[in-house]
Image: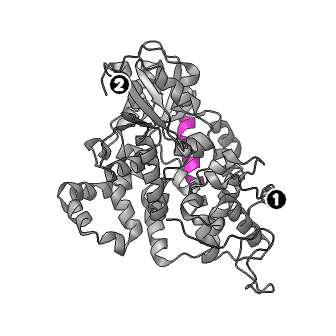
Amino acid sequence: MQTSEPSISLSNPSFSNLDPTADLPGFDAQEPPDPKLIDACVHCGFCLSTCPSYRVIGKETDSPRGRIYLMDAINEGDAPLAASTVQHFDSCLGCLACVTTCPSGVQYDKLIAATRPQIERNFERSLPLRLLRRLIFSLFPYPSRMRLLMRPVGLYQKSGLQKLVRSLGILPQLAPQLAAMEALLPPLSPQAFQDRLPEFVPAQGKARYRVGLILGCVQRLFNPEVNEATVRVLTANGCDVVIPPAQGCCGALSHHQGQEQQAQDLARQMIDTFEQAKVDFVLINASGCGHTLKEYGHILKGDAAYGDRAQAFVQTVKDVQEFLAEVGLTTPLHPLQDDPLTLVYQDACHMLHGQKISLQPRQLLRQIPGVQLREPIDAALCCGSAGVYNILQPEVAEELGRQKVTNLLNTGASVIASANIGCFVQISHHLERQGKSVPVLHPMQLLDCSIRGVGV
């Protein structure tokens, strides 16, 4: 999908057609991208090879350093906040690979996080995009609303209508984003329509910790088996598990797309809920959610009532793999099959680059007898899911998903381990596209099977 476009000249930006005296639409005064953070970028280009959007699109303006240059130009009034610039910010997956790679320590994560709310406040998208985004942010963070929608979707899948619609091939031509959303729908299990886990599940044997579990919005619908497996693993390893029924969405999708007010409201609700639960740790088994939960101190930093509480909350948040690697497994593990089992672990971006968690999942999986871990090439390259990116930017996401699955399959592993619901959906979709039936399982599902002596 690579296209050619003249690169931005970093010493002589190509904004010569703009009237320097014109009052260009730009960022407002409410926390625009920090010029000091912008100036830290020396435009060395180390980020280019690790940036998924640049690798697919091939434009300088769709790279981290190109976007940083655009931020600076908008800050200085040399470029407008308009469709011509917003498209390049929208093409960013927010995978944070550039943050890991940058030798100068540029905090691109903070820069893009400051830019996206500016876009939402100061730029008017086309009507179809506004309606689509309103649909996404009115549904995805609210499991009860999603379940209402999923009931007719379940009928649509089982009646054969889905197969007919896909065979006609009309939807991608009429509405590419809606077509992408429809194509990503996994088969819905009966567990998707209700939360079956009780509010409290006691530890097996002596309790070592009292932990709270966040169920996730999309995960509890599209892959609820992960939460059930997580509870069994935690209780088998000496944890009382609290699952507050009042818990809502963590705000990850909203935060990553600049929906600032919604993200703050959801963060406050989450803090209230788990403060009342009186737990030692708040655990999450989806990496995108985990990264946002750990950002609550920043999201609510200006909130007089919640700022300090957010900082305290963040200190209790851990990814479930991070937690188990720290406290240790106390229950015996059994082989998952008679012969050695080859696994490939897929690094989710917000786990690897956002939370800097890479070794812990591998350490846990290697404790399962007979497991042989394999590593794919380009392991740090995003799969293209990136929250709702694969809906909003389907062409780029399609190419990234194809590359990711090809690299995973080339390891020859018989099972793919993935610890993020978005990655699970994206990888499962592209396995199906390539005619492959390799299981995609969360590490908690693999540990659960090993503890119970159930084969994969």
Q: Which residue is mark 2?
A: 449
Which amino acid does the dot numbered 1 rest on? Asp
The residue under the point 59% across, 64% down is 58
Q: Secondary structure at mark 2?
A: helix
Which residue is the extreme one toward the left?
159
Image coords of residue 453 (percent x, y): 32, 19
The residue under the point 53% across, 49% down is 382
Q: Is residue 425 above or below residue 57?
A: above
Image coords of residue 277 (percent x, y): 52, 33
As for residue 259 lying within the magenta part, the answer is no
Q: Nearer the viewer, residue 100 or 249?
A: 100
The first of marks 1 and 2 along the sequence is: 1
Q: Which residue is mark 1?
A: 39
Q: Please rate how many residues cluster around mark 1, counting C-alpha atoms within 10 Å: few if below 14, some from 14 to 19, many from 20.
A: few
Image coords of residue 61 (percent x, y): 65, 67
The residue under the point 76% across, 47% down is 105
The residue under the point 62% across, 73% down is 5
